Amino acid sequence: MALKSKVLPSYRLLNGNVKMRLVSLMLSLVFSLLFSVNSMAAPSQCVILLHALARTSYSMSSMARYLQKANYIVINQHYPTTRKSIKALASEDVASMVSQCQQYKPSKIHFVTHSIGGIVLRAYLKDYSLPNLGRVVMLAPPNHGSQLADLLRHNLIYQIIAGPAGQELTTGPYSTPNTLSQSVSYDVGIIAGNFSFNPLMRAFFHEENDGKVPLSSTQITGMKDFIVLPVSHMFMMSNTRVIKEVVHFLQNGTFNSSMSI
């Protein structure tokens, strides 16, 4: 008996071809998605954090974590603010942090500074050129010095705690903040605080302040934006609203005054 050849129905062949095409299409989409995610996940901009006087990099850790989640390379390194002059901190420590950043070949290098960190950065940018400089956010910078430094500069305990850099933050015409250029040509946003744990500070400064720096001393000619928030000098760098405003300025060049926490 002759064997009859078995012919598969055409719709089954068609379904098989469709399935193969669908599988191929799905694989293509998966690989494309993975490629795009990897491309997005590769940070191309670096942010250097400069902490305040007598503080450590830990004080900027909340800021660092948020910036990393926002896809920035972050350099958050302790530097000896109480053992060196502002000029030495700029030429040795900030220069080292910039070198670390440059190893990643970033398109931009941004800075976020707290208090004296802003003065150290101004000193660095006075002497060094940074072609890929991005934006700068200064938190409560004593850009014209602080009356507290005037009051305490001859106090032995203050001298021991604040070190040589702390002696440079007075309001006199020859203090470091006032001998640096009194205007900036790069993109700077400044966040000042107007809350103090000590109610007597309002009478001491004769204006709104954050407990250590009055509002008028934080500002500088040429700044791109300025915002005042109800935060204190000591803890502002960990405040959620402050951190969000920092990221907004780095991304857009302005603060978002209507932002909610």
Image (cartoon, rainbow, N blue to C red):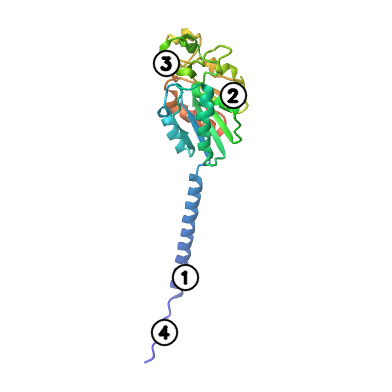
Where's residue 150, x and y in %?
50, 10
N-term-proximal mark, 4 vs 2:
4
Q: Are marks 4 and 2 in contact (CB under 8 Å)?
A: no
Location of the C terminus by quadrant is: top left
N-term-proximal mark, 1 vs 2:
1
Looking at the rendered image, the disc whose residue lies closer to the viewer, 3 or 1, is 3
As helix, strand or loop, the secondary structure at mark 1 comes to helix
Q: Which residue is mark 3?
A: 160
Mark 3 Cα-neighbour bin, 10 Å: few <14, some 14–19, many ≥20? few
Q: Residue at x 40, y 86 (%)?
A: 4
**Front residue of this view, candidates 81 and 92:** 92
N-term-proximal mark, 3 vs 2:
3
Q: Amino acid at mark 1?
A: Leu
Mark 3 → mark 1, Cα distance in angstroms: 85 Å
Looking at the rendered image, the disc whose residue lies closer to the viewer, 1 or 2, is 2
Q: Which residue is mark 1?
A: 14
Looking at the rendered image, the disc whose residue lies closer to the viewer, 4 or 2, is 2
Residue at the top extreme, as displayed: 203
**In the figure, residue 162 lies in which quadrant?**
top left
Q: Amino acid at mark 4?
A: Ser
As helix, strand or loop, the secondary structure at mark 2 comes to loop
Q: Which residue is mark 4?
A: 5
As helix, strand or loop, the secondary structure at mark 4 comes to loop
As helix, strand or loop, the secondary structure at mark 3 comes to helix
Q: Amino acid at mark 3?
A: Ile
Q: Are marks 1 and 2 in contact (CB under 8 Å)?
A: no
